[in-house]
Image (cartoon, coloured by chain):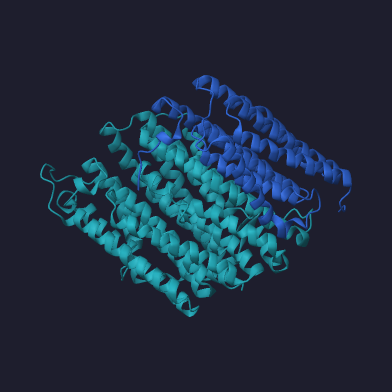
Chain colours: A blue, B cyan
């Protein structure tokens, strides 16, 4: 078992993690759908890079597998698949959230502060990357906010995926070696299948309601 | 081998059914698979009673008394639903509400759903527990969307989006709990994430991460179990899914989610002490019971009524667990057993009524006992059973939960608990007695009960009545051991 190997590695991870958070805020204010998908791909790429750094810092072979899975699944496959879906159903590009841009930004900032408060008792015990837990919790919380704030079905899927990114960041950064490989693989396949099932539903919603606005899904009440 | 078969057999059946088209073949394959699984589950229960815990693949799969109970209950519910589904789907097809393609979809997806549910109590690894629970959602979401209507699409969307958000929290919580244990079990321990290992070392885990992790897991799996305030997907999903799938969700899957909560509770209570964990559970449990009350009283749709009943029962189980001690755990596990036996009948009767009258609204349905005497009578009986009227067994488990609350001096939660349950009983009685005994609707001639559906209803009625009179010793032994394991750690 290695102690924290390199100061550089740790700083690098903190840097990449904060960039993930920056992208998340960007996601909250960026109105174009395709750009949103690409921002998500970039965020996943950062996640894969973090996994790579952790893998090399601890010489842990299976964290490389996690990095590779993230790269193939979340950086390449899912964004490609979502973009194809967007093109297929020919929806308008603009997202139109419920809360306007400056307010969204403020809320994201508040949620990040909250995340740091929540994470305080845990952060001191970390071994690599001093702020990653707080960032992970912030990703989770802002992911929730994104989900509530968006009307379009497909952007809710994106919000879910960024929450998943937050969880995976915590998994990689907190437990040093990540979780056991079989768990990581299981989670990976669940996420991919979940997005594909959601895609099918998005397609049907578009077909049935002639819109992707989930606020039109309001038939069922108590 | 036995453990592997339990999960793999239904999954394989689903895959085998995919290329098949003939309805009779699909029906028989499904029935055969669940009947075999039920047999295997009983065998597993006997093995666990004889040997303590059954393991496979070096502890990768592990079944103790609690998991064996969940396996048996899931198998029982799956068997009853499979028999009911034959009659239900045939009638839906006859009425033109679905076509052959849709019933094919049902027969492919349902065994897969059952297989993923079976996997939940079998896996030892807490990460894989998450994977299994998420898989059940994915396997069942297309069943919720079964009828191609706007409302079912909306229900499915809510089901998967709320469920996935909740379960992301549960995964975060799982990661945090793993983190709190990783210093103790070591980075490289292959089995460090196994429940059986974690519970041994729980008292040496790092409490800060455990505290946060437990809240997240409780909220996450609580979403799947339908605890308030994360319950909003439940009425939609239960009302829109075809009746046998709704019964599987409401009587089978709910146990899987609660099973997850019980496992994590055992670890967290050992690490943090009972006060923190117990208070959280009581808070969510009692809140769920109270949230269900007004919706039960003013409900106009009897399929949605069942969902609120299910929220109420999830609340009872979680609250009982939170009241603490062996008594509280005993109440929770007993309630899980009795609820799973009683609930399918409720769904089946509601399904019969809906098919006969073509509507799930109370307004359009009265005097069922005159047109469908069996259904009307059994519906009343199921109502008494589910709301916990003696001599039915749910009374016993609710009483146990209440004694646990009073033993722990939690007077206020105990008072709210009783008030909630009694009001829900009153609401149910008003609704269902009108539905069953009221003036018959004029233009409905007496109907014939379908033998498949009636068979399923009688199959669940027998143990329902039987358990009211006597609890067989082996079954009680299983429950007792499970309760000891959960409640004996403090």
Image quadrant assignment for residue A139: top right
Q: Residue at x 35, y 29 (%)?
A: B100
Of A21 and B150, which appears nearest the observer? A21
Q: How many marks?
A: 0
Q: Is residue B84 left or right of residue A215?
A: left
Place of residue A202 in the rendered image (x, y in percent of width and height, measured from the top left): 48, 30
Residue B71 appears in the figure: no
| Residue at x-position 27% and y-position 31% | B96
Q: Quadrant of residue A147?
A: top right
- Nearer to me, B269 or B47: B269
Give the x, y percent position of residue A29.
60, 34
Where does residue A84 sit, x and y in percent of width and height?
57, 22
Q: Quadrant of the C terminus of chain B?
A: bottom right
- The residue drawn where x is 24% and y is 56% is B431
Q: Position of residue B423 (x, y in %)?
A: 31, 65
Judge whether B35 appears above or below A214 on screen: below
Q: Relative to residue A203, is residue B27 drawn left or right? A: left
Q: Is residue B18 visible?
A: yes
- Indicate the quadrant where residue B228 lies: bottom left
Decide if residue A35 is on the left or right side of residue B381. Answer: right
User: Which is more toward the observer, B56 or B182?
Assistant: B182
Residue found at the very far front of the displayed protein: A102
- Tell me what residue is drawn at x 49 percent, y 41 percent: B160
């Amino acid at each position: 078992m290695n102690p924290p190997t390199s100061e550089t590695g740790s700083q690098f991870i903190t840097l990449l993690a904060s960039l993930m958070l920056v992208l998340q805020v960007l996601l909250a204010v960026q109105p174009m759908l395709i750009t949103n998908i690409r921002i998500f791909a970039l965020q996943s790429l950062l996640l894969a890079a973090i996994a790579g750094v952790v893998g090399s810092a601890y010489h842990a072979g299976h964290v490389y597998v996690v990095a590779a899975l993230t790269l193939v699944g979340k950086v390449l496959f899912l964004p490609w698949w979502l973009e194809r879906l967007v093109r297929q159903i020919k929806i308008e590009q603009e997202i139109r959230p419920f809360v306007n841009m400056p307010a969204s930004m403020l809320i994201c900032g508040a949620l990040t502060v909250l995340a740091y408060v929540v994470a305080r008792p845990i952060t001191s015990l970390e071994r690599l990357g001093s702020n990653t837990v707080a960032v992970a919790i912030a990703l989770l919380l802002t992911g929730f906010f994104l989900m509530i704030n968006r009307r379009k079905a497909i952007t809710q899927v994106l919000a879910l995926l960024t929450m998943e990114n937050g969880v995976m960041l915590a998994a990689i950064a907190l437990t040093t070696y990540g979780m056991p490989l079989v768990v990581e693989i299981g989670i990976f396949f669940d996420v991919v299948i979940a997005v594909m099932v959601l895609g099918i539903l998005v397609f049907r919603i578009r077909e049935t309601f002639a819109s992707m606005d989930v606020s039109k899904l309001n038939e069922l009440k108590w | 081998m036995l453990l592997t078969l339990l999960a793999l057999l239904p999954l394989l059946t689903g895959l085998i059914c995919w290329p098949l088209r003939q309805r009779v073949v699909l029906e028989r394959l499904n029935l055969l698979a669940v009947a075999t699984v039920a047999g295997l589950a009983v065998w597993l229960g006997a093995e666990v009673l004889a040997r303590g815990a059954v393991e496979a693949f070096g502890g990768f799969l592990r079944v103790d008394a609690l998991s064996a109970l969940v396996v048996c209950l899931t198998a029982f519910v799956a068997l009853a639903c499979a028999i009911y589904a034959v009659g239900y789907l045939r009638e839906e097809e006859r009425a033109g509400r679905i076509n052959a393609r849709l019933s094919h979809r049902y027969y492919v997806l349902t065994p897969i759903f059952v297989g993923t549910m079976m996997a939940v109590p079998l896996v030892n690894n807490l990460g894989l527990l998450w994977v299994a629970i998420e898989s059940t959602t994915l396997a069942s979401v297309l069943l919720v969307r079964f009828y191609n209507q706007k409302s079912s699409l909306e229900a499915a969307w809510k089901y998967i989006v709320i469920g996935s958000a909740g379960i992301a929290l549960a995964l975060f919580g799982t990661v945090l709990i793993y983190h709190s244990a990783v210093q103790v079990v070591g980075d490289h321990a292959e089995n460090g994430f196994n429940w059986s290992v974690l519970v041994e070392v729980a008292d040496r885990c790092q409490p800060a991460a455990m505290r946060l992790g437990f809240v997240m897991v409780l909220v996450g799996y609580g979403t799947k179990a339908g605890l308030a305030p994360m319950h909003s997907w439940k009425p939609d999903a239960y009302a829109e899914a075809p009746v046998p799938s709704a019964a599987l969700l409401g009587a089978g899957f709910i146990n899987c989610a609660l099973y997850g909560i019980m496992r994590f509770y055992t670890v967290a209570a050992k690490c943090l002490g009972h006060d923190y964990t117990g208070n959280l559970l009581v808070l969510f449990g009692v809140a769920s019971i109270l949230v269900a009350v007004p919706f039960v009283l003013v409900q106009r749709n009897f399929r949605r009524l069942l969902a609120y009943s299910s929220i109420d029962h999830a609340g009872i189980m979680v609250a009982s667990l939170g009241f603490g001690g062996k008594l509280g755990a005993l109440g929770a596990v007993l309630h899980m057993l009795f609820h799973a036996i009683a609930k399918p009948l409720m769904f089946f009767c509601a399904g019969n009524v809906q098919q006969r009258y073509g509507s799930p609204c109370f307004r359009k349905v009265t005097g069922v006992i005159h047109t469908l005497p069996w259904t009307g009578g059994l519906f009343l009986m199921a109502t008494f059973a589910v709301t916990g009227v003696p001599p039915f067994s749910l009374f016993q488990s609710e009483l146990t939960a209440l004694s646990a609350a009073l033993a722990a001096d939690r007077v206020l939660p105990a008072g709210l608990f009783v008030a909630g349950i009694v009001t829900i009983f009153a609401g149910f009685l008003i609704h269902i007695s009108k539905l069953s005994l009221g003036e018959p609707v004029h233009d409905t001639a007496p109907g014939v009960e379908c033998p498949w559906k009636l068979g399923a209803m009688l199959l669940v009625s027998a143990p329902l009545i039987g358990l009211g009179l006597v609890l067989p010793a082996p079954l009680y032994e299983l429950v007792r051991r499970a309760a000891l394991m959960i409640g004996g750690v403090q």
